[in-house]
């Protein structure tokens, strides 16, 4: 009898070991498959079981969390959603995350390993902790000024602090409210379908994800290349430029929108925005030096993140001299994001040094303790300091007596450059209006803000586009920054 009891005990022990092994197999070996199964709602339930961390502007949250008392308990909320959507993006239970909500999801959702007191144990238990906060570099006043300036228009604004690379404003219009996308019901699906079908693509972040031909604003880069390569030594010397200018190797004649460009000096040509002078300068500088300077300003950079990725700006590298001429005046296949053109203005304002732009000042723990800070940003030398000084003088002339007069601010030094970019088949599209600028208060040692504005739906008249539309938007943003401290 004892032998049978012993055998039964062995058998029970074997069953227990098999049960434990099977449990281990399910929980360890097969866990990834179960976790990734669409029918498994546990990860989503855990993800939304607690409030999400917040995104802050000027120390105040522009996001929040709402308790729905449902399985996916907390939904994201947004204060002034359309104003900050090009920065925050959305956090949707149905469609995932975008922009800052996506780039900083680990901090905001509480899954960042540094938020766990015992990281290894948290990895094993898959425990979630309270989300941290993301403190942005935005200036609320500048953001509002840019948003109001673009009201009813289609375009974008990017503003930087030249000395640090801090992004002060990032606006895209038309915008959208990310709040209706936060849930997982029919209302969220309808909101997504409506936004996706909108002809003006409000969810497209035009400030960092859309590239445009920069038109005459690119003449800043061409002038920098010509000065650094010593093709131009005297800004007031005639350039022996014909009007019209026949593109090399072709019969195509390039004309100007202003009078007085024939044989104009670089100073005069920059103020009047003479295409012929700068197209000829680009050819004289050559493809190698033009490309080198454009890359120094950030064109061709595939890895720029702020922390979400920025679309690559391009400069044509074709050895064809006629194409080089057009690329040198911001046409042909030269394309730039508004953020890239704000970087160009910032480099001029900062003595030729370009700080890498960034949108996150620091991230913090739930209690407010520092998690990570932006730290010192990489510096790139875009041009010599002497070239930057001469370009600042040229840009001041544009605002004082050229096409950018409407950007002038009383009590401040302002430099700018207007631009009109042709596009479409046979240049049939409504020209894009550009204005890039920087501003320095009378009591400031260095310029405090650099801005780029692009309007997609400006009027076709060249003077009205550059001076009448884009410049006042930039002026409002610059004035907001100068008055905010």
Image: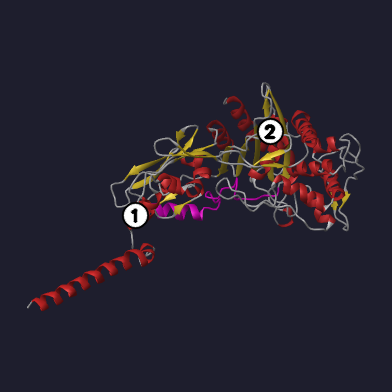
Closest to the observer, 156 or 313? 313
Q: Nearer the viewer, residue 272 or 140?
A: 140
Q: Which residue is mark 1?
A: 125
Residue with the mark numbered 2: 438
Q: Is residue 179 visible?
A: no
Image-based side of 450 in relation to 30, left or right: right
Q: Residues within 10 Å of mark 2 (few under 14, many from 20)?
A: many
Where residue 475 appears, x then y in whole percent?
65, 31
Tell us which disc is closer to us: 2 or 1. Answer: 1
Q: Is residue 171 left or right of residue 224?
A: left
Q: Is residue 27 above or below residue 445?
A: below
For mark 1, does the 10 Å Cα neighbourhood hold few (<14), some (14 to 19), or many (20 or more) residues?
Answer: few
- Taking the spot 84% from the left edge, 51% from the top edge, the residue there is 286
Image location of residue 233, percent across then percent down: 88, 38
Q: Quadrant of residue 8?
A: bottom left
Q: Earlier in the sequence, mark 2 or mark 1?
A: 1
> Which label belongs to residue 221?
none
Residue 188 visible at all: yes
How much space separates mark 2 and mark 1, taking CA atoms? 52 Å
Question: At 36% from the left edge and 52% from the top edge, which residue is drawn?
Answer: 121
Question: Which one is in front, 460 or 157?
Answer: 157
Residue 255: give x, y in percent of width and height.
84, 47
Horizontal relation, residue 58 to residue 156: left or right:
left
* Residue 444 counted in the magenta span: no
Q: Please identify the residue farthest to the left as the structure is shown.
A: 1
> Does residue 366 appear to the left or right of 85 in the view shown?
left
In the rendered view, tell whether residue 380 sits above or below residue 325.
Answer: above
Task: Provide the residue span drawn in magenta.
Answer: 187-213
23, above or below 86, in the image:
below
Please tell me whether mark 1 sits on a helix, a strand or a loop: helix
Q: Residue at x 79, y 40 (%)?
A: 273
């Amino acid at each position: 009898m004892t032998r049978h009891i012993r055998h039964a005990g062995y058998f029970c022990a074997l069953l227990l070991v098999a049960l434990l092994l099977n449990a281990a197999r399910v929980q360890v070996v097969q866990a990834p498959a179960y976790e990734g199964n669409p029918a498994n709602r546990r990860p989503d339930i855990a993800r939304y079981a607690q409030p999400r961390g917040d995104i802050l502007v000027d120390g105040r949250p522009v996001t929040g969390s709402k308790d729905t008392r449902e399985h996916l308990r907390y939904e994201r909320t947004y204060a002034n959603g359309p104003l900050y959507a090009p920065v925050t993006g959305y956090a949707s239970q149905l469609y995932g995350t975008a922009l800052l909500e996506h780039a900083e999801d680990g901090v905001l959702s509480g899954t960042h390993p540094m938020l766990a007191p015992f990281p290894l144990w948290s990895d094993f238990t898959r425990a979630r902790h309270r989300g941290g906060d993301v403190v942005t570099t935005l200036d609320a006043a500048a953001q509002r000024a840019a948003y109001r300036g673009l009201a009813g228009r289609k375009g974008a604004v990017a503003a930087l602090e030249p000395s640090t690379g801090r992004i002060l404003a990032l606006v895209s219009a038309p915008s959208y409210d990310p709040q209706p996308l936060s849930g997982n019901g029919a209302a969220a699906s309808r909101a997504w379908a409506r936004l996706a079908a909108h002809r003006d693509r409000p969810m497209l972040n035009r400030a960092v994800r859309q590239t445009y031909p920069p038109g005459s604003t690119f003449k800043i880069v061409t002038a920098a290349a010509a000065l650094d390569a010593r093709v131009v030594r005297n800004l007031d010397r005639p350039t022996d430029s014909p009007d019209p200018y026949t593109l090399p190797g072709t019969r195509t004649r390039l004309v100007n929108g202003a009078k007085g460009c024939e044989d104009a000096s670089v100073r005069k040509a920059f103020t009047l925005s003479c295409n012929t002078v700068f197209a000829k300068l680009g050819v004289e500088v050559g493809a190698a030096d033009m490309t080198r300077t454009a890359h120094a300003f950030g064109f061709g950079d595939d890895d720029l993140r702020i922390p979400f990725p920025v679309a690559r700006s391009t400069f044509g590298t074709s050895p064809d001299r006629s194409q080089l001429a057009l690329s040198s005046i911001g046409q042909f296949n030269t394309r730039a994001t508004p953020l890239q053109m704000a970087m160009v203005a910032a480099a001029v304002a900062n003595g030729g040094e370009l700080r890498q732009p960034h949108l996150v000042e620091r991230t913090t723990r739930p209690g407010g303790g520092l998690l990570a800070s932006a730290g010192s940003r990489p510096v790139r030398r875009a041009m010599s300091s002497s070239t930057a000084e001469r370009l600042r003088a040229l840009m001041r002339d544009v605002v004082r007596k050229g096409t950018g007069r409407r950007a002038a601010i009383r009590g401040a030094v302002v430099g700018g450059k207007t631009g009109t970019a042709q596009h479409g088949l046979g240049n049939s599209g409504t020209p894009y209006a550009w204005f890039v600028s920087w501003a320095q208060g009378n009591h400031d040692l260095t310029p405090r803000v650099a801005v780029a504005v692009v309007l997609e739906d400006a009027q076709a008249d060249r003077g009205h586009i550059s001076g009448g539309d884009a410049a006042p938007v930039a002026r409002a943003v610059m004035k907001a920054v100068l008055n905010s401290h």
